[in-house]
Amino acid sequence: MGNPFEHDLLKNLGPEPLGDGFTVDALKAACAKRSAAIKLVIMDAKVVVGVGNIYASEALFRAGILPEISANQVSKPRLTKLRAAIREVLSAAIEEGGTTLRDFLNSNGQPGYFKQRLFVYDRKGEPCRVCGKLICQTVLGQRSTYWCPSCQK
């Protein structure tokens, strides 16, 4: 049968964000060649798997990085913060049972409670929980993107 990770659908995937393979150097190498918005790059499964729209917005907020900045313009120190923020956000979301926005229930019939801990996602026009400025929203890669104009540079 062979190694399943050699299958065409799996062999080009990036590392798991909570695993040892997701290093700052790997993230920097992936970003160095990309002029796309950093949010789109971290949502690319070839760069890192499992960072969806909600968690990308939240990680970028925690790292203080604007979602629209070109990936190749993000410095290594800022990528270090971003890597830590991605891991922090995903770990917190797992601990809270995920993010229920509408009617999702887990296998125990419970909703995920991470929505109560969101700083920016789906909070357009609401005050930032850190600085009080109003949360902004735009569309990147056909996905809603949220950020704080004061906390993220």
Image: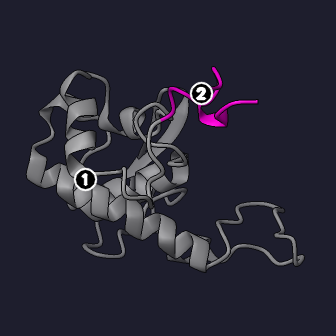
From the image, state whether disc 1 or disc 2 is nearer to you: 2
Give me the residue at 32% from left, 42% from top: 67
Name the foreground residue: 66 vs 35.
35
Location of residue 25 in the rendering, given as x and y in whole percent from the top left corner: 19, 44
Location of residue 144 in the rendering, given as x and y in whole percent from the top left corner: 52, 40
Say whether residue 140 is left or right of residue 130.
right
Give me the residue at 82% from left, 70% from top: 106
Give the CA separation, mark 1 to mark 2.
43 Å
The correct choice, above or below, for 120 with respect to 37 in the image is below
The correct choice, above or below, for 143 with respect to 128 in the image is above
How would you classify the magenta stretch by its main secondary structure?
loop
Residue 6's disc is 2
The correct choice, above or below, for 109 with respect to 6 in the image is below
Say whether residue 84 is left or right of residue 57.
left
Where does the N terminus fall, quadrant-wise? top right
Residue 149's disc is 1
Location of residue 73 in the rendering, given as x and y in whole percent from the top left corner: 13, 33
Say whether residue 107 is left or right of residue 120.
right
Q: Quadrant of residue 18?
A: bottom left
Give me the residue at 51% from left, 33% from top: 13
Name the foreground residue: 91 vs 39.
91
- Count of numbered badges drawn on the protein: 2
Location of residue 137 in the rendering, given as x and y in whole percent from the top left corner: 44, 45
| Mark 2: amino acid | Glu
Q: Which stretch did the figure color magenta? A: 1-13
| Mark 1: amino acid | Pro
